[in-house]
Amino acid sequence: MAEPGRAGGSPEPPVQVSIILPVHNSECWLDECLKSVWEQDFKGTMELSIFNDASKDGSAEIIEKWKIKLEEAGISVIIGTNNSSQPRGVGFAKNQAVMQSSGTYLCFLDSDDVMMPQRVRLQHQVAIQHPNSIIGCQVRREPLDSTERYTRWINNLTQEQLLTQVFTSHGPTVIMPTWFCSREWFFHVGRFDEGGKGVPEDLLFFYEHLQKGGGVFRVNQCLLLYRYHPQAATHSVLEETIWNHRVRFLEDRVLSSWTSFTIWNAGKQGKKLYRSLSPANQKKVTAFCDVDEKKITKGFYTYEESEERPKPKIPVCHFRDATPPFVICVKLAVPPL
């Protein structure tokens, strides 16, 4: 996809980093968020690109107040607005903020989060070394006791696990509010899905990024205060929606090149995976394997929902007797966002 040009010529030096900030009814967090932009210790050229998506609160006034202060500090501010009665959604707002910006690198920020002063500087250093990658960072959750296991998981994945655990996670292995990447790579991957409420636009972009050979890195320092609250957009995405996207990604990325495989788990999760597969991939399942004697003694699983006659019966065996490759399907003790 070709990158859209910014309107009008400018004699000013090119902007190195654009901070991408979608806003919707964010007045209770926005002061702290914008203050964290102002406090960045990055010495290069930086701009803030805000897209206000039909806010009905005092967000616009807060933005105008900070625009003056930020520009006095040498950070140019671009403000786009959706003036309609209804918001277009996070994906649309992010895309608009990206398109009106001009930075060589993009630093994504949510309006309810707070950056540490060194965030842009440290992620920019890594992004230069890895131009086709998404760069994340460690986070501190607020309130501190919210999603404790999930926060521990995202902060402690190894470099290898950032790629190997893309099939096990409820979202990207580096969370969206920590993303930092080159503009060129962003437009190579494409824009965010603009389906609106209920669409996991970050997960879909992340999968497309991986499909196109993109890398994933994380700065192993806490560079973001990541807020948890009931109004967060992530709560509008159903767990079943994420599950379905994960299964499609597994099918495209892995199962498409397999002629047969065994599902390791003859219980609820394994059967759910089987039922979620396309008919072509269901036919590749040679068996379920397990250690539960009751499941093994029964000998097979009948797919009752199938319209085939006779209904498919998939053998259930002990894992010692199973044939690789395996899809290991167990529920991790990591809650969704």
Image (tube, rainbow, N blue to C red):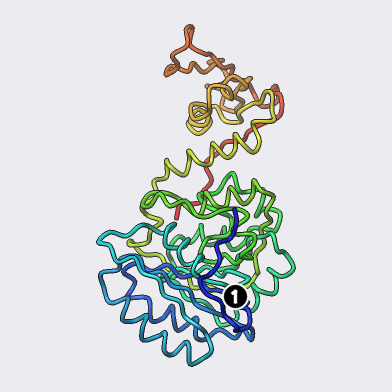
Residue 99 lies left or right of residue 195; in this view the side is: right
Q: Residue furthest front?
A: 9
Q: Residue furthest bottom?
A: 72
Residue 121 lies left or right of residue 18; in this view the side is: right
Closer to the camera, 207 or 113? 207
Where is residue 171 drawn, in percent x and y? 52, 52
Residue 200 lies left or right of residue 264; in this view the side is: left
Give above or below for 184 relative to 9: above
Where is residue 263 drawn, in percent x and y? 60, 28
- How many marks are shown on the rendered structure? 1
Give above or below for 136 relative to 63: above
Quadrant the C terminus occupies: bottom left
Give above or below for 157 relative to 121: above
Residue beneath the point at 64% across and 86% down: 43
Classify mark 1: helix, strand or loop: strand
Residue beneath the point at 74% across and 68% down: 129
Q: Residue furthest top?
A: 310
Closer to the camera, 272 or 215? 215
Where is residue 299 drawn, in percent x and y? 56, 15
Closer to the camera, 49 or 136? 49
Which residue has dot 1 on it? Answer: 17
Report crowding for label 1: few under 14, some 14 to 19, many 20 or more residues within 10 A (C-alpha). Answer: many
Give above or below for 171 relative to 49: above
Residue beneath the point at 32% across and 75% down: 59
Residue kind at label 1, given as amino acid type: Val
Where is residue 209 drawn, in percent x and y? 62, 52
